[in-house]
Image (cartoon, grey):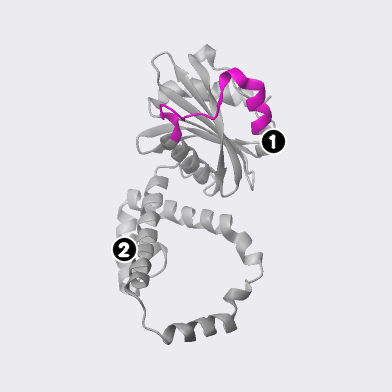
Amino acid sequence: MLHAYVDDRLDAEQRAEVNRRLAADPGLRQRVEAWRAQNATLRDALSFKLRQPVPPSLSLAALTEARLRRTARPATHWRIAAGLVLALGLGGAGGWFGHEMMPFNRMMPPNEIALLGLESASAYRVFANDPARAIEVGSTDRAEMTTWMGQKLGRRVVLPDLAPVGYRLLGGRVLSTVSGAAAMLIYENAARDRMTLYVRPMRLGREAEMQPIDLQALEGYAWINRQIGYSVISDGDRDLLRPVAHLIRDEMKL
């Protein structure tokens, strides 16, 4: 019902009931606001599509002709099944991503900083603790890594020295996002706990002070400085990560 509320799909009576629940439950209000922020992020990320011409295959004449051809023969079961799977998959994904966004601080700029946190957390889960392919370029090739990442991002990339806070650089990789390329550096401490630094140019580039983020079992900090977004993520104690994040922020301002 909350998803239907955010999508404005409820009737007047149902909407009134949800409004009463939201008024009495700050947690539900925060969840709804996070989902609305996610919708705005997706609209911003895909707004370029509205400026593109409609492909000839999607013209009214082409669609009408295709519909006439389909009605000439019975629909097959696999087409119906595929449609159901797609509908269910999109519905589930919307709920999951909305759930992940819920913990973000409401003071953050809702579009860019939220998306930055989701991207960095996803990258951490996929690559950070992969025993074989966590990185593409190792720390022994720092010059190569700096040049390569800088070319992909179109910005100079600094490789922070985190030895003063007990972390050594293992290496990094370049990732693809809806807004362009991103870089991820992976660090490890003496206990073999890993931490990642996620960096990418921000499309809008609104400045944002360092803010804590909490995504399921992952914790960290995110901020935007000079149109570059940064996110420091680990699955450890956020208090132990704070001095690491501050050191990175100070070095990245150079």
The quarter holding residue 225 reads top right
Vertical relation: 247 (above or below) 21 = above
Tell me if mark 2 has few (under 14), some (14-19) or many (20+) residues whose alpha carbon lies within 10 angstroms of its own: few
Secondary structure found at label 2:
loop
Front position in the image: 158 or 242 = 158
Vertical relation: 120 (above or below) 61 = above
| Circle 1 residue | 151
- Disc 1 versus disc 2: distance between alpha carbons? 46 Å
1 or 2: mark nearer the eye:
1
Horizontal side, residue 11 vs residue 200: left or right: left
Tell me if mark 1 has few (under 14), some (14-19) or many (20+) residues whose alpha carbon lies within 10 angstroms of its own: few
For the residue marked with disc 1, what is the amino acid? Gln
| Circle 2 residue | 1
* Labelled disc at residue 208: none
Q: Give the residue displayed 42% in from the left and 46% down from the top.
A: 101
For the residue marked with disc 2, what is the amino acid? Met
The C terminus: image quadrant: top right
